[in-house]
Image (cartoon, helix red, strand yellow):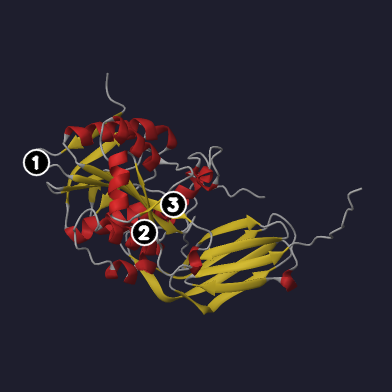
Amino acid sequence: MEIERRMLKATWGYDGNLEPLYEVEDKEDEILVTFDLPRVRKENVEINTTEDSVEVIAKMSDAVCWERWGGIQKRITFQAFRKQIRLPEKIEPEKAAASFKNGILRITLPKIRRKVFIQIE
Amino acid sequence: MEEVVRIVEEEGVVHKNPIVIAGLPDVGLVGTIAASYIVDKMGYKEIGYVESDLFPPVMVIHEGKLKYPFGIYGNGSVIVLLSEVVVPPNAIYPLTRALTAWIKEIGAKLVIPITGLPVENRVDISKPEVFAVGNSEAAVKELREKQMELLEEGFIAGTYAIMLRECGKRDLNAISLLAQCFPVYPDPGAAASAIESLELFLKLGIDVGELLEKGEEIKLKARDLMRQINLSAPEMQKGVEQDMPIMYR
């Protein structure tokens, strides 16, 4: 899996997007990706997948505004979470499923895999 | 020889056998969120700080003032240890030794590290349960009397685990409260449950309503610290908390 280098990379951008916390788990036949999306409602979540990536754009119900902070030192407003993740294995986008509960988005992504049953002699 | 970790108290602080609450960054940021809320609601003043060359070269700016990221707050009867940065793994042992030596010196009667107990199905849990670990027979007896759910078998890992150990070495009773939490996301709900359990030991009368209402805002602010915790988790051996001990009966 590609390793994200985080030297001076912030988890926010001047484009009004925040990077959400997320977790990628290998569940043998599928990959489970979860995102923590506070202040987001289900109807404002957009998920796009390809065979090797998943992208989430989630608009917050109320924008968050931070002032006098860090290198900004004036007002900055964030309206959405946005993150694209490269997946460790190829998946079948058409069979992906998602659920959203208590601010946690869960996306299950079935791997492309051909199973062969092996008989033990 | 200069100490590796230094506890610096302001002058004139009078301790009255306090109870010490430790809210250091760990899973779910349960301890940090709980400690921060307690300090805010109780209006505890900063009475000191912890510094070390083993800590990252970071200082905090709050309201234009330079502050140490590891602060000590409280009044004569309650002390809260609160850190805004992750304790590096190589600092855990000297930190806990220095802290417990100081806690013993000030005559504390009980130490309560607050942390999280990661559970996979946290999203389906509406009100997290709180479990407890005591570091002595007396501590465990008190937990049973208060009908706390004990962790009976397993491993614990991280700063709070070594804190319990070092307290034990100095005959300090310590009880760790662990609230069910998300493994990798900040969990104000778990912090609220932990504060409610704290009432059994320390009647602060804190209403957690505001904590729950502001939960989403807290999650937004806590993202970066949570990310740091997640990056340090492997070196902290946090994964071993999911393992079964070989001596399990």
Identify the element where label 2 is drawn.
loop
- Real-space Cα separation, disc 3 to disc 1, in angstroms: 33 Å
**Which residue is at the front of the view, B55 or A108?**
A108
Q: Quadrant of residue A108?
A: bottom right
Instruction: Give the residue type that dot 3 points to.
Output: Val
Label 1: chain?
B
Q: Residue at x 32, y 56 (%)?
A: B147
Q: Between marks 2 and 3, how big is the CA–CA gap?
A: 29 Å
Question: For mark 1, what is the residue?
Answer: B14
User: In percent of the image, x 61 and y 57: which residue is there?
Assistant: A24
The residue identified by callout 2 is: A72
Residue B100 occupies quadrant: top left
Q: Residues within 10 Å of mark 2 (few under 14, many from 20)?
A: few
Viewer-side residue, B39 vs B173: B173
* Residue at the spot 18% in from the left edge and 32% down from the top edge: B105
Quick one: SS at disc 1? loop
Say which residue label 3 marks: B27
Circle 2 marks a residue in which chain?
A
Depth check, mark 1 against mark 2: the one in front is 1
* Residue B9 seen in this snapshot: yes
Tell me if I can see residue B23 in this picture: no
How far, Cα to Cα, is label 1 from label 2? 41 Å
Secondary structure at badge 3 equals helix
Nearer to us in this view, A119 or A53: A119
**B198 displayed left or right of A43:** left
Left or right, B40 with respect to B165, comes to left
Most extreme residue toward the top is B1
Nearer to us of marks 2 and 3 is 3
Asked where in the image residue A78 lies, by quadrant, the reply is bottom left
Q: Position of residue B21 (x, y in %)?
A: 26, 48
